[in-house]
Image (cartoon, rainbow, N blue to C red):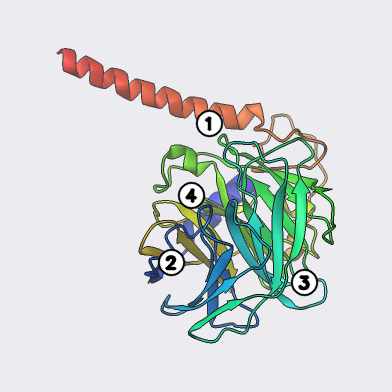
Amino acid sequence: MRPALALIALLAAAPAPQPLFHITDPRIDEASGIARGIASPGVVYVQNDSGDSARFFALDARTGATLATYTVPDATNVDWEDIAVARDRRGVPSVWLADIGDNDGNRSEIRVYRVDEPHVRAGTSAVTGAPEVWRLRYPSGPTDAESLAVAPGGAGYIVTKALLGGSTVYALPARPSAGVQTLRQVGRVQFQLTGTPGGPNRIGQLTATSAAFSADGTVLAVRTYTDAYVWRVRAGEVAAALRVAPVRVALPAQPQGEGIAVDGNRLLIDSEGVDSAVYAVPLPALPSAASTRPSSPKPTASPSPRPLSTPDEDRPDRDPFPIGWVAAGLAAVAALVVGLRRLVRRRR
């Protein structure tokens, strides 16, 4: 079965999502990420993006009640767009905070912070230990991003946010440094207009807002405002996984869905906004690890469908023309047709 057809078949089999709880803490009005605890397994962590202090919140994973608040010393929240929990290179459960948002495209340096995950006690308001800090830049200059995924062992990946759907995936250096380090490109993802409702507008179907690995590192998920794209990862080979068409999962409509976590056999998703809902979305069946190796190209008389992912060889960090521009162009044409029809009706 061709990748595009497999994608459709697996999408149709996905069970219905279930609401878990609402985030009722008025301090959490721009939840821009979500991650399940390891040292504190009954907890999910969330953080606000720009406008808040350098802190994150521990919520009860069943009820959503705020259990504790943690401030990261010597850190700044310019635009914290994602949060992850994973064991670091020492095997220590850690919280990773992605200060990577750049809507105006003018940040010459972005940062990722790592702190040891706390053992959460209800009613706590505490300061974490001193963070490790990755000072980072893109090889092609300032770029907006909202998605950070961290694999077991501490390998981190940033997925950029592009209005036309052509996102680039970068790997963080293995260790932080006192100086600014350059991110390494490992792959690209081309999102498409899906028709899934939700988000601030139709372009939200094309823009990546969060990413996450499963606890064992075998599943990678990236979400847009409306859909999740899921890959099977074999032996930590993220670049190879991205060359295979992902499974798409339509997400429940959210006003500004910006968080995703892989929690066992389900995805957890949250949204910005006061009293926003957190949903559990069942993971569909994924290809086995053995079947995710990229196959050698075979001669064909007609062109095969373009995969949703493209290889990582020296691509510029911008939307590729063929799919992104065509998708946006079709949306613009459709809007123009609707407008002309309305105009004609008014004149009759």
According to the picture, the residue beneath numbered tag 1 turns out to be: 327
Q: Earlier in the sequence, mark 1 or mark 3?
A: 3
In this rendered view, identify the residue nearer to me: 54 or 205.
54
Return the x and y of residue 88 as percentages of the image width and height.
Answer: 77, 71
In this rendered view, identify the residue nearer to me: 17 or 315.
315
Q: Earlier in the sequence, mark 4 or mark 3?
A: 3
Three-letter amino acid code at the position of disc 4: Tyr
Tell me which residue sits at (53%, 52%) in the image. 50
In terms of secondary structure, where does tag 4 sit?
A: loop
Camera sees residue 259: yes
Q: Earlier in the sequence, mark 1 or mark 2?
A: 2
Q: CA distance from mark 1 to mark 3?
A: 39 Å
Which mark is nearer the camera, 3 or 2? Answer: 3
Q: CA distance from mark 2 to mark 4?
A: 14 Å
Return the x and y of residue 149 as percentages of the image width and height.
Answer: 67, 60
Camera sees residue 17: no
Q: Earlier in the sequence, mark 3 or mark 2?
A: 3
Mark 1 nearby-residue class (10 Å; few <14, some 14–19, many ≥20) = some
Residue 92 shown left or right of residue 37 in the figure: right
Q: CA distance from mark 1 to mark 4?
A: 16 Å
According to the picture, the residue beneath numbered tag 4 turns out to be: 225
According to the picture, the residue beneath numbered tag 3 turns out to be: 88
Tell me which residue sits at (68%, 35%) in the image. 304
Residue reaching furthest front?
A: 74
Q: CA distance from mark 3 to mark 2?
A: 27 Å
Return the x and y of residue 17 as percentages of the image width and height.
Answer: 42, 65
